Amino acid sequence: MKKICRYLSPLLIAALVLGSLPVAAAPAPAGSDLITTQAALNAEHGQADRERIHEILARDDVRDQLVAQGVDLAEVEARVAALSDAEAAQMAEQLEQLPAGASAVGVLFAVFVILLVTDILGLTNVFPFTR
């Protein structure tokens, strides 16, 4: 038994040492790059931006306005499909920031209320009926 252990022990030690060393990954074939997690998340985010743009373009009121302006709907779809991920993200962000249903009447009303309050507080002298 001691004779077997004498020959088997160095082999087991060598196997354990070699098994614990880091193994270099096989070289990837030319043309196939590994995709990082960040790249996968960016691709998913870009797809979500395109879906958001398509949702807005699918609304009837938006389509009616595009047709009224003389824009071909097929050309709009082709241009949205041709957007890069950065452009799609920028367009989706701009669509989110656009006011929904705001008009000049709302702005004028807000200015009137602000001037009225400042006039009542005595900071301005715009409306004579506040005295």
Image (cartoon, rainbow, N blue to C red):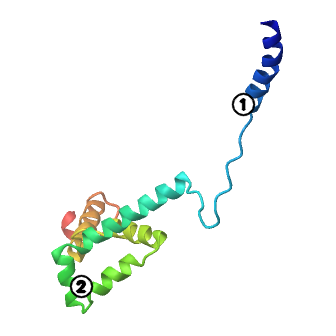
Q: Position of residue 58 (x, y in %)?
A: 22, 73
Name the residue: 42% across, 58% down. Answer: 44
Of callouts 2 and 1, which one flags the residue occurring earlier in the amino acid sequence?
1
Q: Residue 85 or 20: which is nearer the viewer? A: 20
Determine crowd level at label 1: few under 14, some 14-19, many 20+ residues with C-alpha closer than 10 A.
few
Q: Quadrant location of residue 75?
A: bottom left
Q: Is residue 63 visible?
A: yes
Q: Where the C terminus falls, by quadrant?
A: bottom left
Q: Residue 53 or 61: which is nearer the viewer? A: 53
Q: Quadrant location of residue 29?
A: bottom right
Which residue is denoted by mark 2 in the rendering? 66
Q: Is residue 67 above or below residue 123?
A: below
Extreme residue toward the bottom, this view: 70
Disc 1 marks a residue whose amino acid type is: Ser
Which residue is denoted by mark 1 in the rendering? 20
Q: Position of residue 12 (x, y in %)?
A: 75, 22
Q: Position of residue 34 (x, y in %)?
A: 58, 57
- Kind of element beneath mark 2: helix
Q: Is residue 119 above or below residue 64?
A: above
Q: Is residue 53 above or below residue 79?
A: above
Determine crowd level at label 2: few under 14, some 14-19, many 20+ residues with C-alpha closer than 10 A.
some
Q: Are marks 2 and 1 in contact (CB under 8 Å)?
A: no
Name the residue: 30% across, 57% down. Answer: 121
- Kind of element beneath mark 1: helix
